[in-house]
Image (spheres, rainbow, N blue to C red):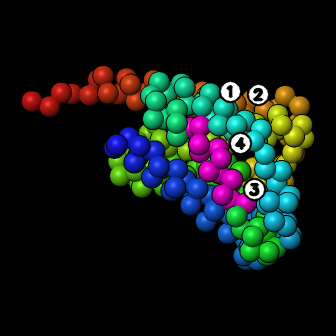
Amino acid sequence: MKPLRFILKSIIFYASFSAAFSLLGIFPILEQFLPKSYLIGSPLEVSGISIEHLIGHVVFGMMVGVTSMRIRYVAIAGIFPIALDADHLIQFLNLESIPRMGHSILFGFISIPLMMFFAGKKDYMLGAISFSAVLAHVSFDILRDGTTSFPLFIPIINKMITFQGYDWIVFLLVAIAIVGITRIITKNHAEHKPQET
């Protein structure tokens, strides 16, 4: 029961952070750091939600999560890319905003300490999966749509960046590498940690 509670808690927090982060796009004071906001429309009409969309994100996330070699992280990695789409919820407010704010490297970095803090411990693997979920999500969106744009490098580059073709492979491989390297580092750290007497 404890692992299930951890998984559900992590998913709820991640989706909440993504939704909250998307609110940054409605504040005019930040417009010099962000792409131009506009009235996007209901996500039910403009976001192309489908079974293929849901399954694709789960599969790509789980491919990343497998390198953690732990079932609970495989499950979390499979759901986080879908939870990331909570950044579309702002569209229901019918305000001018910026689409896909959670689909950015900045959100990925911010999610690491937030998720580790709300997990209640120094869970480096959860932090790595939080960041990698952004990359896995973007990867599948590129593969599915062929050409698509994200505010990926805000606030350094304040415009939507377009990706296409085989760019999805780079994002997926980087996501897999981040989780894999984190597993190696945390495993080595645990093995060399002095035993308590």
CB atoms of marks 4 and 2 within 8 Å: no
- Choose the circle earlier in sequence order: 4 or 1: 4
Query: Based on the displayed image, in which of its 4 quarters is residue 140 positioned?
Result: top right
- What secondary structure is found at the residue carrying circle 4? helix
Q: Quick check: is 120 in the magenta stretch?
A: no
Q: Residue under circle 3?
A: 100
- What secondary structure is found at the residue carrying circle 2? helix
Q: Residue at x 55, y 53 (%)?
A: 14
- Regarding residue 114, the answer to whether it shows in the image is yes
Q: Picture coordinates of residue 167 (x, y %)?
A: 82, 32
Provide the residue span drawn in magenta: 77-88
Q: Residue under circle 2?
A: 169
Q: Residue at x 30, y 22 (%)?
A: 191
Q: Amino acid at mark 3?
A: Arg
Q: CA distance from mark 4 to mark 1?
A: 20 Å
Q: Residue under circle 4?
A: 54
- What secondary structure is found at the residue carrying circle 3? loop
Q: Residue under circle 1?
A: 173
- Choose the circle earlier in sequence order: 3 or 1: 3
Q: Amino acid at mark 4?
A: Leu
Q: Is residue 27 left or right of residue 178?
A: right
